[in-house]
């Protein structure tokens, strides 16, 4: 019957065969200044002392017995988020129950995120813990809302046509019944116009809802709400104080604003639905998380010469679920802030034209009509198209590449100068990092060398961490590990109370470790990593790194967009020279190596996190990032055109009043002017959106 050590060594050999190049031999030599020819490896049967261990086709391999690791330190599936976490035995669980100590990980609000990466507590979001049935119900509700919004748009378009004909019968050459004649029955026509306004509000019930309930299309709703209230007050003023004067209404212009307001609201729901479908899918997603405060200290110090002080730093992460979706999707962006000033300015322009009309004719009827017409001409209704089209195109394009832009604030988040930090596992995937050779030095225990390397790099995470975690997935590794120092070419750590150094030959020699020379170091094109325990060299490891085929193109696209790139790693093999052999540098690209200094800097994978940008693939993530910056520029340009449009209305309307007359301007003229103002907006969004 096999003893425990034999079984453990057998398991370790199985794991090594999966992740170590089978054509190589693990060697064991004495520490001398002159290299000695490695002896021929003994058969595995002789090494382990029994005949049951026979593996055909793999060649001989020199392997020492693996150091047994207590079962309490073996990594379990539940500890996948934090590989350094030691398993608590049953006695400790009993003590917790006896003394009434609550287990922190069982808190439903914090169980999803490792304790070292939890963020500040925020208000609970109703979308954070949705079941599958709830997701289906919410998606069905989105589709129902979209169908109703499309129907409302058709009804509003029909009302615009009918109202424009009713208010401009003389231009279309037909006569209305007497009771609809604004000259003979102005009060009746006034009340009809008010009913048109009430019906338009009925098709936009969200217009006067509380801000706390929804922020969908917030700025467009305010434009329409002010316009409809001002127009109703204008109609009531004419009914009460000018009952004998012909009724001059501008319902068609107000309904035109209602149509685009509804279009913005429809676009907001459509964007929200597309983002919901991507964010709450079951697949793993890439995201960009902004590093705040001390989190960005490493990146900031590495790139302070290349980037400005206003630079924002982001980390590429992989998550399963999204938090704060409902909170972020309804937060408005800064591009819509000019509305706060545009609306009162347009009202002031209308008042100014009202005084101008009074000074010209001394007629109260002409003064209020000219003032109302001036306000409607000055209000850039075409701006509502700018709030709809670019953002909807952005969301549609992201959705086509399985990405999601969550809320308007994403454009503000990613607009300033930025640096994106990748982990080395994103650049060198774990399945493309191989352990080619392991050479034991000074009669060292090979299982101890691999076990200590696993303990160090599983704690740091990244490409080596993922590779070593697979190697020892069945045998486990010690969790008693703390960093001492980390430098560019190596690191020191305390593992099971022993001083362990891992790094290049130069790194170990600078610290007084005698490393036997190896002529293959000069010829080897792969990475060479040495290990010393208690300042005695114990192992030499050759590793092969294969870079992700898409990473170079992604990095170059980010450089072209003015975004810096940083690679976060604890791996002593990855440095500037190492990267230059794998990436074709085009100019002085701001790519930096960001090396972790402490255990808190380790690379972890979150199960869930708040995010404004998501994608099931990295290329889609960065295409959407670039599109966010372009979309914000388009919207800012559109707002600039809207301001020019508002200012241009002053001389245009003044010329119309002085050359044509005050009674000649109707709602149809306002519609034509607003449509002319829409043309540059359409051109910009179609060409660049």
Image: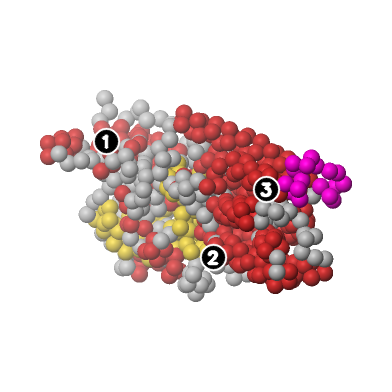
User: Which residue ends up furthest to the top in the rendered image?
Assistant: 1
Residue 587 vs 673, above or below: the answer is below
Residue 553 against residue 59 in the figure, above or below: below
Q: Is residue 335 visible?
A: no
Residue range highlighted in magenta: 169-185
Residue 53 in picture, x, y percent from top left? 37, 30
Distance, label 2 to label 3, CA atoms, is: 56 Å
Rate crowding at label 2 as few (under 14), some (14 to 19) or many (20 or more) other CA atoms within 10 Å: some
Mark 1 is surrounded, within 10 Å at the Cα level, by few (under 14), some (14 to 19) or many (20 or more) other residues, namely some
Q: Nearer the viewer, residue 124 or 588?
A: 124
Identify the element where label 2 is drawn. Answer: loop
Residue 73 part of the magenta segment: no
The tag earlier along the polypeptide, 2 or 3, is: 3
State how far apart marks 1 and 3 are (Cα). 101 Å
Residue in the image at 41% along x and 61% along y: 292
Q: Which residue was labeled with disc 2?
A: 416
Residue at 57% x, 64% y: name it.
344
Q: Nearer the viewer, mark 2 or mark 3?
A: 3
> Are the residues at dot 1 and dot 3 in contact (C-beta closer than 8 Å)?
no
Q: Which residue is mark 3?
A: 187
Q: Position of residue 152 (x, y in %)?
A: 65, 38
User: Looking at this view, is 651 or 32 the one in front?
Assistant: 651
Q: Residue at x 51, y 37 (%)?
A: 281
Position of 607 compared to 682: left or right?
left
Q: Nearer the viewer, mark 1 or mark 2?
A: 2
Q: Quadrant of the N terminus?
A: top left
Pointer 1: what residue?
Answer: 5
Quadrant for residue 529, please give it.
Answer: bottom left
Q: Is residue 181 magenta?
A: yes
- The numbered mark, 1 or 2, whose residue comes first in the sequence reads 1
């Amino acid at each position: 019957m096999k003893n425990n050590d034999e079984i453990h060594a057998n398991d370790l050999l199985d794991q090594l065969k999966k992740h170590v190049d089978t054509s190589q031999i693990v060697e064991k030599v004495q520490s001398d200044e002159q290299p000695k020819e490695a002896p021929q490896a003994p058969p595995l049967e002789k090494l382990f002392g029994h005949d049951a261990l026979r593996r055909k086709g793999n060649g001989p391999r020199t392997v020492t017995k693996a150091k047994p690791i207590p079962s309490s330190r073996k990594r379990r599936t539940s500890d996948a988020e934090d590989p350094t976490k030691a398993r608590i035995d049953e006695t400790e669980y009993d003590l917790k129950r006896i003394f009434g100590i609550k287990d922190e990980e069982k808190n439903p609000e914090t169980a999803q995120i490792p304790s070292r990466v939890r963020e500040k507590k925020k208000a609970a979001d109703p979308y954070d813990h949705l079941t599958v049935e709830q997701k289906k119900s919410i998606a069905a509700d989105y589709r129902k809302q979209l169908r109703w919004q499309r129907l409302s748009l058709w009804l509003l378009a029909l009302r615009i046509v009918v109202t424009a004909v009713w208010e401009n019968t003389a231009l279309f050459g037909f006569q209305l019944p007497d009771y609809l004649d604004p000259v003979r029955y102005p009060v009746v026509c006034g009340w009809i116009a008010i009913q048109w306004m009430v019906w338009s509000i009925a098709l936009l019930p969200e217009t006067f809802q509380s801000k706390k309930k929804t922020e969908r299309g917030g700025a467009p709703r305010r434009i329409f709400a002010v316009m409809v209230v001002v127009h109703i007050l204008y109609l009531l003023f004419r009914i009460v104080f000018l009952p004998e004067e012909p009724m001059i209404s501008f319902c068609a212009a107000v309904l035109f604003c209602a149509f685009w307001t509804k279009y913005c609201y429809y676009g907001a729901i459509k964007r929200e639905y597309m983002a919901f479908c991507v964010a709450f899918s079951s697949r793993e997603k890439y995201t960009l998380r902004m590093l705040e405060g001390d989190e960005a200290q490493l990146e900031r110090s590495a790139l302070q010469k290349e980037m400005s002080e206003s630079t924002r730093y982001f980390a590429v992460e992989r998550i399963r679920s999204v938090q704060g979706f409902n909170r972020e999707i309804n937060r408005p962006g800064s591009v819509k802030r000019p509305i706060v000033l545009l609306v009162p300015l347009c009202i002031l322009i209308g008042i100014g034209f009202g005084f101008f009309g009074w000074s010209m004719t001394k007629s109260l009827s002409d003064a209020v009509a000219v003032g109302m017409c001036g306000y409607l001409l000055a209000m850039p209704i075409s701006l509502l198209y700018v709030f709809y089209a670019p953002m909807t195109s952005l969301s549609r394009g992201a959705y086509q590449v399985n990405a999601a832009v969550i809320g308007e604030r994403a454009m503000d988040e990613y607009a300033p100068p930025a640096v994106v930090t990748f982990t080395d596992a994103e650049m060198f995937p774990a399945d493309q990092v191989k352990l080619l050779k392991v050479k034991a030095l000074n009669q060292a225990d090979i299982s101890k060398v691999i076990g200590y390397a696993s303990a160090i790099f599983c704690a740091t995470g990244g490409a080596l961490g993922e590779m070593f975690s697979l190697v020892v997935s069945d045998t486990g590794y010690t969790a008693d590990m703390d960093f001492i120092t980390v430098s560019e070419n190596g690191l020191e750590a305390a593992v099971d109370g022993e001083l362990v150094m891992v790094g290049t030959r130069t790194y170990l020699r600078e610290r007084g470790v005698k490393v036997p020379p190896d002529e293959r170091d000069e010829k080897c094109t792969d990475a060479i990593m040495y290990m010393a325990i208690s300042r005695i060299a114990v192992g030499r490891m050759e590793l092969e790194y294969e870079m992700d085929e898409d990473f170079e193109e992604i990095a170059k696209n980010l450089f072209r967009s003015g975004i810096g790139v940083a690679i976060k790693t604890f791996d002593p093999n990855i440095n500037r020279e190492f990267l230059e052999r794998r990436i074709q540098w085009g100019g002085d690209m701001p790519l930096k190596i960001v090396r972790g200094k402490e255990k808190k800097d380790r690379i972890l994978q979150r199960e869930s996190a708040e995010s404004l940008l998501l994608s099931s693939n990295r290329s889609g993530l960065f295409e959407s990032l670039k599109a966010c910056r372009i979309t914000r520029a388009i919207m800012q340009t559109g707002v600039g055109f809207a301001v020019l449009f508002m200012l241009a209305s002053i001389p245009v309307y003044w010329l119309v009043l002085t050359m044509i007359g005050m009674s000649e301007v109707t709602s149809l003229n306002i519609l034509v002017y607003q449509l002319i103002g829409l043309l540059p907006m359409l051109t910009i969004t179609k060409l660049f959106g």
